[in-house]
Image (cartoon, grey):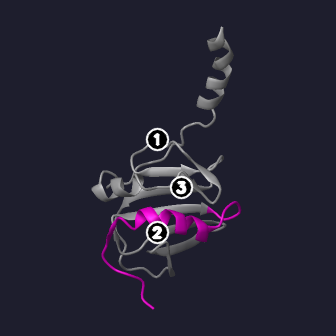
Amino acid sequence: MKLFRLLPLLLLLTGCSATVVMDPAEDANNPYCAEVMVRLPSETASQQKRVTSSQSTAAWGEPVTVSLTCGLEPVEISALPCITAGDVDWLVDESDKPTYRFISFGRTPATVVTVDSTKVSGATVLEDLGLAVQFTKKTKQCLG
């Protein structure tokens, strides 16, 4: 009898969010990405972490407001503006604003974080996620 009372609650808890379908990066199995993934926060900018479909990916929010992919080709030369947040240098790609892409600069492998700035602050997200991304290998830093 008690199991029948708990069943709706169990269904509610397990059926909250669908898996976020994401493509893995080519170097998703890089050990540095594993270091990043185990250190990612369960929440960023008040958004809860979701389950994703691919290795070395993460997403937050319902609908998704923040996504992360580790395992990209390192970037060491770029004309994009470079900022530092969360002890990581980030290239800022605002070509699709108000959605911004932040690509780790001078890190092997590279990580990209995509943020819907209408819903969350990119600065807050980069501070939170930079704590994990800083475990990739640093090869260069922003100038100036």
Query: Quick one: label 1 or label 3, which is nearer the N terminus?
Result: 1
Asked if residue 50 is positioned above or below residue 125 in the image, the reply reads: above
What residue is shown with label 1? 53
Label 3: few (<14), some (14–19) or many (≥20) C-alpha neighbours in 10 Å: many
Q: Secondary structure at mark 3?
A: strand
Q: Position of residue 28 (x, y in %)?
A: 34, 52
Image point (60%, 67%), residue name: 124
Kindly indicate whether the residue at mark 1 contacts the one at mark 2 (C-beta within 8 angstroms): no
Image point (38%, 65%), residue name: 110
What residue is shown with label 2? 103
Question: Bounds of the magenta span?
Answer: 116-144
Kindly indicate whether the residue at mark 3 contacts the one at mark 1 (C-beta within 8 angstroms): no
Query: Quick one: label 2 or label 1, which is nearer the N terminus?
Result: 1
**70 or 26, which is in the foreground?**
70
Give the numbered dot on residue 67. 3
Give the numbered dot on residue 113. none
Image point (62%, 55%), residue name: 65
